[in-house]
Image (cartoon, grey):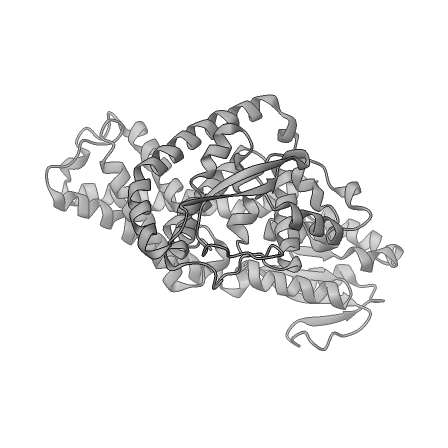
Amino acid sequence: MKSIKKIKFLKRNVALRLADLLVTIVGIIVTVLLFNLKYFSGFELNLLVWLFTYAFYFLLFGEIFEMYQISKSYDVYFTIRSIFLTTISTTLAYILTPIIAPVLPESRIEILMFFQAIFWSLLLWRVVYNALFFYPIFLKKVLIIGEKQDVELLIEIISNYSSEFKVIGYVSSEKINTINDAIKWYPKDNSFLEKIVNDEKISTLIICGKAIKNSFQTYSNSILKIFEKGIVVISNNEFEEQLTNRIAKSRLNDFFYDYFTFSKYNSNHIYLKFIRFFDVIFALIGLILLFIMIPFIFIINLFYNKGPLFYSQKRVGKNGVIFKLFKLRTMIVGAEKGLPLWATKDDLRITPFGKFLRKTRIDELPQFYNVLKGNMRFIGPRPERPAFVSMLEEKLPYYALRHVIKPGLTGWAQVKYPYANTVEDQEMKLRYDLYYLKERNILLDFKIVLKTINTILFYKGY
């Protein structure tokens, strides 16, 4: 059941990627035929290799530049920026790998035409797609069964995280005055649930656990018939998790372990050996990069970040074991006097050069030593300081679960919710970390790597 729901959630994203690929390939073929581009001489001999290479680059850069972040599809600037960056990166990567792509063209105009073929075909298609996508008749219509707090939260989540769902109405014991009148209210004792679903052409029925517990007999038969018609019937917690890619806050209760299971990959030896291999590769590359940059960082540090170049801190690792983490110093000397403090977004203790190091994540490069040593992995929950861990374990249920696996230099919580300087923020990051522990796999790891690249390229560090 759960896997079927996830497939339905993924369908639109997969279809969009395939459609983008098809449209741009058609654009390239039309351009070749119209202008007789020599760049593609011998087209028929190497077609499959070239297409595979192009598809790889296109999908890779499309992911890095967030071309498939559906919640931002309505933003014209964001869409054009993503298309432009994806197109130019794909073009450059493609023409610079002539062994598995056509030989580098002699004329620069052919490179420009190759770029234009991808860009304009993709842009025109996305204009049409967005016009259809946001047209009311193509939105997935949602009906919620729940009470005030759950209904309000779901409407807010849909508004913030999705553009493909439209809440048509809600079934509850009373009308909720804070909700727009355009969203219809149906009384809780209404026995015509099937009629509402049919009349409003509902495609997704969301059931809030609190609402259904006391009214199971009222709705159970109707919900079964609705489900049999192929309409998605899903709990509010499951819906929130699939939309936001984090554990729902209401899951963090006494029944948490009835729902939560660790990903099988957490104990899969092949997977663990595989990621350890890549940890070592990434660590060596990162340390080589640090070695190359150190002379320049050292000189700038003398003027704009006076004091030691490196610093170390105790952090909590796997199974609660304390280890020493290394970073480039970004704060003034003696920034912490007394109790440890969380860094904030515009922390006055951060030096001007330190701010640059944080924004670009260069300050994290020494941690590749921790990765190589085995204290950390490239991907995992960020390691926290012992004092904060003790406090957070008291305030946040299940915080200690983060220590089931090794901490990481980057992670799902880091790329999804970078700032955390309050207990509330830490709870939000915990929910992302728990989602990673539950869903951990190669594809999710790869997605984190791409999102980390995006964070560095767009200066999103803190």
In the displayed structure, 337 sits above or below 7; it is: below
- Residue 122: in sight, yes or no? no
In the picture provided, is 202 more to the left or to the right than 324?
A: right
In the displayed structure, 33 sits above or below 201; it is: above
The extreme left residue here reads 107
* Quarter placement of the N terminus: top right
- Whole-percent x, y for residue 107 in the image: 10, 41
Q: How many marks?
A: 0
- Residue 117: in sight, yes or no? yes
Closest to the observer, 445 or 327: 327
Q: For the point 73% across and 71% down, which residue is it? A: 185
Q: For the point 48% across and 24% down, which residue is it? A: 277
Closest to the observer, 178 or 118: 178
Q: For the point 54% across and 63% down, which residue is it? A: 137
- Whole-percent x, y for residue 313 in the image: 55, 44
- Whole-percent x, y for residue 29 in the image: 25, 41
In the picture provided, is 279 more to the left or to the right than 224?
A: left
- Whole-percent x, y for residue 131 in the image: 43, 62
In the picture provided, is 2 more to the left or to the right than 313?
A: right
Q: For the point 42% across and 28% down, which residue is it? A: 281
Q: Find residue 195 and report its image quarter.
A: bottom right
In the picture provided, is 299 more to the left or to the right than 369?
A: left
